[in-house]
Amino acid sequence: RYCDVAGGAGAAHVDENCTLDLDSTNTDVAPLFADPDNGDYHLKSEHGRWNPNANGGAGDWVLDNVTSLCVNGGDPASDFSNEPMFNGGRINVGAYGNTPEASKNRWLITTDANFDEQVDVLDLLTVRDKLQQDPTSGNNWRCDVNTDGFINILDLIYVRNHLRTRRE
């Protein structure tokens, strides 16, 4: 369950006297590994992927131009507490799921611009302070709450309309 099986059930080798039961939670998608030819099986993510070779080999977070469908693709009942913030609230599929090196994803409450798990006046102030800034620079993406590619008055309105939302 909740696996990415290359080629689906038809591609799996099943020994005689064994059965394979793949349900609808399994996928057959390109996992978008960072650098599988060199042993780096971290999942690509536009919101942050651990690159062990970055920062002169010390490792660091990097941003990709695409996000793997395996990010947040795991069992919703599985623990994801070891994944770094901002993890999207669901475990990643793969070797780095529920580890400190799990690829990141957009926060669950998009209007929670300061990531305190509730939408209140502090989020309005956070967005206000980033008005007209580049949403692709640093962590400014969190203030483009309506995801239109701009940080502007529409984001403030969007937050205002979602005040008192909490993460359950």
Image (spheres, rainbow, N blue to C red):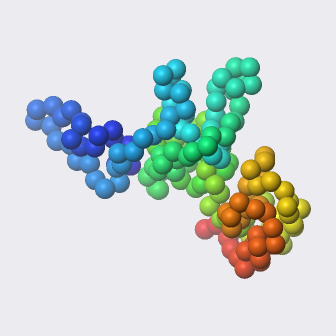
Viewed as shown, does residue 126 lie left or right of 44? right
Taking depth in this image into account, of 144 and 1 the one nearest to the observer is 144
Number of numbered discs overlaid on the protein picture: 0
Name the residue at 67% across, 63% down.
147
Residue located farthest toward the left when viewing the structure as drawn: 17
Name the residue at 15% across, 37% down.
18
Q: Which percent across, then down, holds residue 26?
A: 34, 49
Taking depth in this image into account, of 122 and 69 the one nearest to the observer is 69
Q: Which percent across, then down, holds residue 146?
A: 69, 67
Viewed as shown, does residue 118 lie left or right of 104? right
Q: Is residue 79 visible?
A: no
Is the residue 75 above or below the residue 112 in the image?
above
Q: Which percent across, then down, holds residue 60?
A: 71, 31
Name the residue at 51% across, 45% down.
68
Query: In the picture, residue 115 is in which quadrant?
Result: bottom right
Residue located farthest toward the bottom when viewing the structure as drawn: 161
Is the residue 122 above or below the residue 98 in the image?
below
Is the residue 156 above or below the residue 47 in the image?
below
Q: Is residue 66 visible?
A: yes
Query: In the picture, residue 151 is in which quadrant?
Result: bottom right
Query: In the picture, residue 5 is in which quadrant?
Result: top left
Taking depth in this image into account, of 71 and 68 the one nearest to the observer is 68
Residue located farthest toward the right when viewing the structure as drawn: 129
Name the residue at 86% across, 63% down.
131
Viewed as shown, does residue 129 lie left or right of 69? right
Q: Which percent across, then down, holds residue 67?
A: 56, 46
Q: Quadrant of the C terminus?
A: bottom right
